[in-house]
C-alpha cells in the first residue's frame, strides 16, 4: 500500500505540473507530506487509479466486479484545493 491509498477525503490536490502533454499531480496527505501522482497511479482505498489530470481536477476510476463477473466503473474526482485569502487592504485604509 502507498501513502495515496487512503480515504480520498483526506487527500488534497494542490497543483499540477506539465511536461509536454504529460501531467503530474501534486497531492498532499493528511500528514502534510506531498506526493506526485501520474496517470495510472493507485489512489484511494478501493484501488482507484488516476484516469486523467487537469489544471483544476483529477479524475479517479475505481473498478470492481460483481458476483456475476460484470465489471463496473465508478468515477470520482479531486478538485484543486484553494486557500481563501482575506483582503485586508480596506481594513488598513479605514484605520489610517
Image: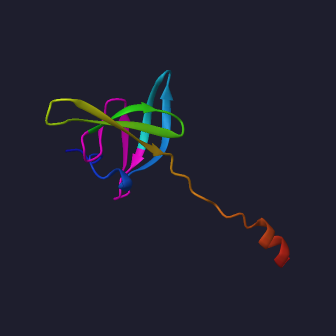
Q: Is residue 29 magenta?
A: yes
Res 33 visible = no
Q: Position of residue 37 (x, y in %)?
A: 36, 37
In the displayed image of the protein, which residue is found farthest to the top? Answer: 20
Q: Which residues are magenta?
A: 27-47
* Coloring applied to the structure: rainbow
Residue at figure coordinates x 28%, y 51% from the top left: 6
Q: x%, y% of residue 45?
A: 25, 47
Where's residue 62, x and y in %?
30, 37
Q: In the figure, residue 84 lies in which quadrant? A: bottom right
In the displayed structure image, the side of residue 73 where residue 81 appears, left or right = right
Residue 92 in picture, x, y percent from top left = 79, 72
Q: Residue reaching furthest bottom?
A: 95
Q: As drawn, is 74 to the left or to the right of 70? A: right
Q: Is residue 52 at all visible to an observer of this figure?
A: yes
Q: Nearer the viewer, residue 26 or 80?
A: 80
Image quadrant occupied by the C terminus: bottom right
Image height of 91 relative to 82, above or below: below
> Would residue 3 be found to the left or right of residue 21 on screen?
left
Quadrant of the rendered image containing residue 58: top left
On-image quarter of the N terminus: top left
Rendered image quadrant of residue 77: top left
Point 45% across, 29% down: residue: 23
| Total numbered labels | 0
Residue drawn at x 49%, y 40% as measured from the top left: 57
Amino acid at each position: 500500500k502507498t501513502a495515496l491509498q487512503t480515504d480520498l477525503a483526506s487527500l488534497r490536490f494542490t497543483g499540477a505540473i506539465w511536461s509536454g502533454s504529460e501531467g503530474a499531480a501534486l497531492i498532499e496527505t493528511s500528514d502534510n507530506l506531498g506526493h506526485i501522482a501520474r496517470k495510472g497511479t493507485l489512489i484511494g482505498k478501493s484501488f482507484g487509479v488516476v484516469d486523467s489530470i487537469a489544471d483544476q481536477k483529477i479524475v479517479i476510476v475505481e473498478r470492481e466486479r460483481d458476483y456475476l463477473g460484470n465489471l463496473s466503473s465508478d468515477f470520482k474526482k479531486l478538485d484543486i484545493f484553494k486557500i481563501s485569502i482575506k483582503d485586508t487592504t480596506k481594513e488598513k485604509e479605514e484605520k489610517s
